[in-house]
Amino acid sequence: MQQVLVQGLNGLSLAGILILVALGLWFIFGVLGVINLAHGELFMLGAYAVVLIHNLTGSVWLGMVLAPLLIAVVGLGIEVSVIKRLYERPFDTLLATWALSLIAREGVTLVTSGSYQGVPAPVSGTINIAGAGYPLYRIVLLVLGVIALIAAGTILYRTGLGLRARAVIFNREIAGSLGINVRLVDSIIFSLGAALAGLAGGLMSPLITISPTMGLPFLALSFLVVILGGLARIWGLALGALIMGAGPAVVAFFTTPVLAQIIILALAIMVLRFRPRGLLA
Amino acid sequence: MIRTLSVRRHQWLGLTVLAVAILGIALAPIFASSYYISVLGEALAFAVFALALDLLWGVSGVLSFGHAAFFGIGAYSFGLLTQHLGSGSAPYVALIAALVVPAVLGIALGFFTFFSGVTGPYFAIITLTVALILSQIATSFPHLTGGLSGLSIPGLVLPTPAGELNLSDVVAIYYVGLAVAVIALVVGFVLVRAPFGQALLAAADSDPRAASLGYNTALLKTAVLAFSGAMAGIAGALYAPMASFVNPEVVGLTLSTNVIIWVALGGRGVLVGGMLGALTIAFLSSYLSGTLGHVWVLTLGILLLLVVLFKPSGLLGTRAIRRLVGSA
């Protein structure tokens, strides 16, 4: 029972992080129509930003606050210098963002000479779950993921920027003809998405080994979260993250963890076959 | 996009250039050491793989982000069957399996995607997921696949009408590789020029238009996916005895994206472009990655970014070369 709870909570806190990574992808894919294959590297750079700031100032909290801002600037740079040039060449943005992902991974490897880094968790307490101590920080992650989703939903459905973003998602040409500065919305949304990836990487930095390749597994997982959730409603991300994050933990009760992972991935493909617009569409 | 079927005069020049290149590769064993021959041999297998991707991506406009799934399944099918069947005609049986199994995967995948209208970026993500699943299987079931260390391929002797061919001989398998590459290229050219290939080009140009002309575009795309998968499988089966082992790397993300880089740099839709891209980069990689390490991969990344931004048709995709070789 105890183990069941711990596994379930681990899955849920992974889902929290997946929401953060996938939110950025969702905005970028929805608004710009760009599949950002460098998203995992923005996540990775967020974690390295925390390492850097922690080494400089000794504060992990400060790192976690500044990481999204730094990565937003990186994202803006990418959008202006690369993505804008590839307007209406969707496959070429795939290639270009993959090239950026390679450059970021190899560049960071060269700069850090490939050494693994780690930072301490800013919240060190544990809470008592059925007699076992469970790290409080993981619970914080889940809560933050949910808060971020609600905040993003609020921005999307309750603000002027959100209205413009939804107009662009709905129909780019008509949004432009109605006087919305589509290019500006693109830039803002891309750096917002990058900031979310940076935030996720920063928050995840105390929990995983920080290495140049740490973003890749999160890229594939969070894409499937976006696809499962669909672009129609942002809340679908919660469902997608729950399936991709907690799903393997649940299935693993019946079989081996590896097989559970395979089953969840295969399930995601099946869903795409029968509900190509996402589970909620 | 008007494409003609006839072979024009300047194309003969292109074909002559191509023939000289092939002759050069054919004569390489005379002056190159066996190390370089084995490296170039593996590069030939990768060139066939790049051609397979180009038929799918360059010709029919469908980008697979997990094409190593087909290459890897071909390599593993070949490896498993030659291990369990012993010698004799086993290599032939293994070769047929390396062709049929990936083709079946292609048909299944086409049914799951094209027939429900899944294309474009969604298809790219699905194929990526398939490659991830397969590399998960390859690493996690050691009793079947040898796990992380992989399968070792036994020394094979291929009985042919002209006598026995020892596949563990570096030069012999090199010529097998060259023959397969040339045959694959000819098949590719014929395919693109056949009505099937022209219909694919039409569907790549505009799917709804091709459909309104009466083409079943889902069926066309599934057929080319199966064909491309089979060709990638053959490339895998060619690679396996050359490398003398098969490990999860042949099915994973790195090879899947490498082949995209080869084709993107060489030039999409120029069948020779992707092959030359693969030959050059695979050959350079195998000894530059030793000395330059991460700097080499970084350079490739920067090169890819520059080509995508400023020369999207690829380095060999210039109009002159397109006209010279006269491909799709």
Image (cartoon, coloured by chain):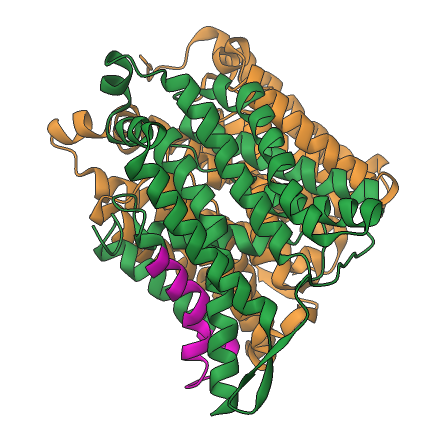
- Indicate the colour of chain B: orange
Chain A: its colour in the image is green
Judge whether residue A253 is colored magenta.
Answer: yes
Where is the N terminus of chain B found, in terms of image quarters? top left
| Residue B76 painted magenta | no
Left or right, B75 with reference to B301: left
| Residues shaded magenta | A238-260
In the foreground, A266 or A158: A158
x and y percentages locating residue A119 in the rendered image: 75, 58
Query: Can you tell which quarter of the image residue B221 is in?
Result: top left
Overall secondary structure of the magenta section? helix
* Observer able to see residue B162: no
Residue drawn where x is 47% and y is 34% of the image: B54
Q: Nearer the viewer, residue B295 or B175?
A: B295
On the rendered image, what quadrant is the C terminus of chain B found in?
top left
Considering only vertical position in the picture, is A96 above or below B141?
Answer: above
Up-down: is B15 above or below B243?
A: above
Say left or right for B218 vs A263: left
Residue at 45% across / 72% down in the picture?
Answer: A248
Report the front residue among B191 and B172. Answer: B191
Residue A239 screen position, x and y as percent: 33, 60
